[in-house]
Structure formats: C-alpha cells, structure tokens
Image (cartoon, helix red, strand yellow):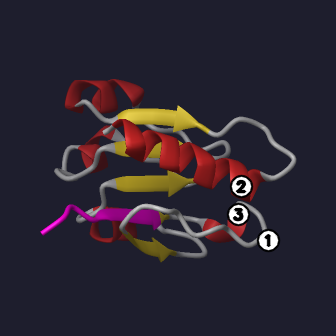
C-alpha cells in the first residue's frame, strides 16, 4: 500500500477564484471556504499538508496534529514557526505570482517530492 498525502486548504475562498490544477501525486484533497478556530484541529487531524491563506495556526493546534509534515502559507496567515520547527514541520510561503494557482500547486509538488 502506498502513502497518500492528505492536503487540506483551510480558507480557499480567500485565496483566488482561479481553478487550481490537480496535483500529480497521490492525494486526498479537502478544501473549505473558511475555517473557524474550533474547526481547525478536526479539519487538520489527519492531514499531512495544510494550505492556509488567512487562518492562523498556533502552537496548541500544531501540538495536536501528529501527521502534519508541511504548511504552505498563501497570504497573511500567522503560523507558529517555533512550534513547527520543534516538530520538524516545514513552513513555506507562496511567492508572489501572476498565476497563483499554478504557483501553489508547483510549490506543493516540489515539497512533496522532497519527502
């Protein structure tokens, strides 16, 4: 049985209206228009990758997410970098691009290929 990535986009509505290409790796994809603080850990509990635009992710949440490998920040979201570093979770910020959807999937695929 092969490993399947579980990607969760916490606040897709804040990112862009553009369609996102489908990542080329084996994955399950979940996306939400926005995420309220009480929904954060339940939505991310099984995730390996989180994409957030404006939803903050604090040390308390990070401490409960045992499968999390990476976080991609596409906007102003605040992520507790110290908590991520302590757990070995990679945090990357999406560079500014004319095609943010393409750039996001390209960054995601590059990060998955490294692990």
Q: Is residue 90 above or below residue 25?
A: above
Q: Which corner quadrant holds the N terminus?
A: bottom left
* In-image side of 53 versus 79 (left or right): right
Front position in the image: 41 or 102: 102
Tell me what residue is drawn at x 34 percent, y 70 percent.
43
Tell me what residue is drawn at x 71 percent, y 55 percent.
102
Return the residue at label 3. 14
On the image, which quarter does residue 12 sit in?
Answer: bottom right
Return the residue at label 2. 102
| Mark carried by residue 17 | 1
Q: Are marks 1 and 2 in contact (CB under 8 Å)?
A: no
Front position in the image: 11 or 48: 48
The region drawn magenta spans: 1-8
Looking at the rendered image, the disc whose residue lies closer to the viewer, 1 or 3, is: 1
Could you say whether the residue bearing mark 3 is in a helix, strand or loop?
helix
Could you say whether the residue bearing mark 1 is in a helix, strand or loop?
loop
Query: Which is nearer the N-term, disc 2 or disc 3?
Result: 3
User: Picture coordinates of residue 80 (x, y %)?
Assistant: 40, 33
């Amino acid at each position: 049985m092969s490993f399947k990535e579980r990607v969760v986009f916490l606040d897709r509505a804040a990112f862009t209206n553009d369609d996102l290409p489908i990542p080329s790796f084996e994955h399950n994809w979940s996306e939400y228009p926005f995420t309220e603080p009480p929904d954060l850990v339940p939505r991310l509990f099984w995730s390996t990758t989180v994409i957030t635009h404006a939803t903050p992710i604090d040390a308390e949440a990070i401490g409960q997410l045992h499968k999390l490998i990476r976080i991609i920040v596409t906007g102003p979201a605040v992520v507790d970098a110290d908590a991520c570093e302590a757990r070995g979770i990679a945090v990357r910020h999406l560079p500014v691009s004319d095609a943010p959807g393409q750039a996001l999937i390209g960054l995601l695929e590059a990060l998955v290929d490294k692990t």
